[in-house]
Image: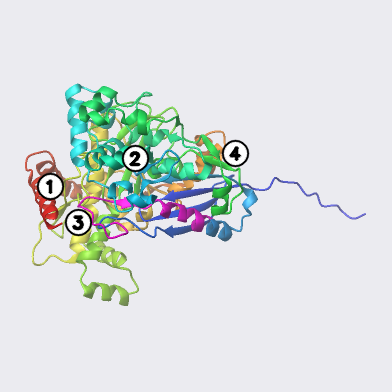
Amino acid sequence: MANAKHCEQTAPDSYVVGIDYGTLSGRAVVIRVRDGAELAAAEHAYRHAVLDQELPDGTPLPPDWALQVPSDYIDVLRHAVPEALASAGVRADQVIGIGTDFTACTMVPTLADGTPLCELPEYGNRPHAYVKLWRHHAAQAQADRITALAVERKELWLKRYGGKISSEWEFAKALQLLEEDPEVYRRTERWVEAADWIVWRLCGTYVRNACTAGYKGQFQDGSYPSVDYLGSLNPEFADFVSEKLEHPVSQLGDLAGTLTAEAAGWTGLPEGIAVCVGNVDAHVTAPAAGAVEPGRMVAIMGTSTCHVMSSDQWAEVPGMCGVVNGGILPGLWGYEAGQSGVGDIFGWFVRTGLPASYTEEAAALGRGPHEHLTALAAQQAIGEHGLVALDWHSGNRSVLVDHDLSGVMVGLTLSTRPEDVYRALLEATAFGTRTIIEAFETAGVPVKELVIAGGLTKNDLLMQIYADVTRRPLGVIDSTQGPALGAAMHAAVAAGAHTDIRAAAQAMGKARPAVYLPDPARAAAYDRLYAEYRLLHDYFGRGANQVMHRLHGIRAEASAAAS
C-alpha cells in the first residue's frame, strides 16, 4: 500500500497597499498582511512638482510660496498602484485594503463636493486657488498674529503647541487666503487637508483624520479655537470653522469607507475594499518602525525631518509642533517636532555650490555628487573644517517656530573646500535634532533612543554624526518605504486583519535597533561645536539680532517692486 502524503490546507495570503504622498512624488507599496513583507514598490513623480516660482500658466509667485496641483495626486493612483501590483505578482482580489499618508500641513481649497478650486477655469491663474504645500511659508505674518492674540487672551490650547503657531498650519494659511484673496476664500466651501482629500477621492466620503486635525488644525479636547477668538483675528474669519473646516473626526486606523468604482478603475484594485482614514507621513511611520512604547523618538529624514514620539505623560515642550492624545497611538500622548530643511539643504548645496571639477571627479569614480562629497567629508577629523552652520535654509520649525529665519555659515576662508561645507551642513542638521531632544528632556519627556527612517538612512556618515552629536543609539527602520508601510499597516487594521495598530506593528513593523552607537571621544568633540551652534542659534533666533528678519523684509520689498 502506497504511503499517502498529508497536505495541510492553509488560507491564502492577503495583502494591503500603502501609498506615501511626499513632496515631489507618490510611492505605492504592496505589503503582505501576516508579516509585513514588502513585495513591490513603485514611484510616480508629480508632473508639476512644487510650484514655487510660477503657476502652470506662468503667473509669477512671490517669495516663500510653495503650491501643488491636486491632479498630480490622482496620477499616483493611476500609475504607481497598478505598477506596484503588477511587480508584486499579486492578484487584485487578494488585496483587502488601501491606506495613505501625506505631507502636512498641505491644504486644498475645494467646493462642497471636493472639487479643487484650481480646477475651475476662472481660478486657474489665482495662486490661492491651488494646494498650499506644507512648506508654503508665506503666512508667517498671520501665524505671528494668531500666536500673539492667543498669548494675549491666555488661550489654553496654545500650550499644546509649545506656545507658538506655525505658518505651515491650517489656520495661518486660511487667514492668509482670506486677507489676500477674499473672493477665493468666499468660494472655498471646504478647507481640506490633502491627507483627507485623497481619501475622499478614494472612497467618496469626507472624513477628517485625528492626526492632522490635532497637530495642524488646533483641534484639542474636541473643539477648535472659539468664534470669538477667530473673529478677533479678522471679523470675516469668525465663522471659518463652522463654514469651511468643521467635519466629523475619525481615529487613526478607522475605516473611512470602501473603494469606489471610479477609484477602482484608477488603481486596478477591487471595488469595495477597505479605505483607511488618512494619516501624516511622519506619524504613520512610528508603528512601522516598531516605536509603540514611550521614549523612542522616530526621526523621518528626507527633504525635511519630522520627529515624533509617544509618551504616557503630557508636558509643555517649548517649540513643539503639537501634542495630541492618541495622535500617533491610542492611549498615549503623541508629540511632534521637526526641522523644515534637511535633505533639501544638502540638495541645495549640490545644486548650486558644487564645482564642475567635483562633478567630473565623482563621475570618474562612479559616484553620485552626494556620495562623493560624503566620502571626502568622512576623511576629516571633527572640527577640521573650522565651520559651524545653522540649518535654517527653509526656516526653523522647532524649537523657534519661525520661518523668516535663514541659514548661516561661520568660519569660511579661502581654503574652505566643498566637502568642508557639506560636512558642516550635515552636522548642522544633527545639531538641530539635538536642540529638539534637549527641549523635550528639559520639559520632562525623556528621549531614550532615536529610530531613523527615510532615504537619508543610506548615508552612514550622516547616521554616525547623529549618534555622536545626540549621544544616543540610532536604530534604523528596516524598510525603504517606512511611511507607505505604516499606511498599509493602518489599512490592515481598517480591513479587520489586525485588531489594532499595536498588533499590526508587532506582526508587520520593521526596525533594526542600535545600528549606530555614539563614540565617547567623537561625542565630546561634537559638544564643543554644538556649544558654538547654540550661541549662534540663540543670537539669531531668540531676538538678540533681528538681521534675518530685516533681510527677509528687504527681499520681500524688492521682489514686490520688481513685479
Q: Per the image, is 57 magenta?
A: yes
* Three-letter code, disc 1: Glu
Q: Residue furthest right?
A: 1
Q: Nearer the viewer, mark 3 or mark 4?
A: 4
| Range of magenta residues | 55-81
The span from disc 1 to disc 4 (Cα, nearest Å) is 51 Å
Mark 3 — residue? 424
Could you tell me how far apart the alpha carbons at marks 3 and 2 are, in whole angstroms?
47 Å
Tell me residue 156's x, y (percent): 26, 22
Say which quarter of the image contains residue 242. top left
Where residue 190 sits, quadrant-wise, is top left
Mark drawn on residue 187: 2
Relative to 28, is 205 above or below? Answer: above
Label 3 vs label 4: CA separation? 47 Å
Please give the residue where the numbered disc 1 appears in the rendered image: 532
- Which quadrant holds the N terminus? bottom right
Q: Are marks 2 and 4 in contact (CB under 8 Å)?
A: no
Secondary element at image label 4? loop
Question: In the visual, does 274 lie left or right of 66?
Answer: right
Q: Residues within 10 Å of mark 4 (few under 14, many from 20)?
A: many
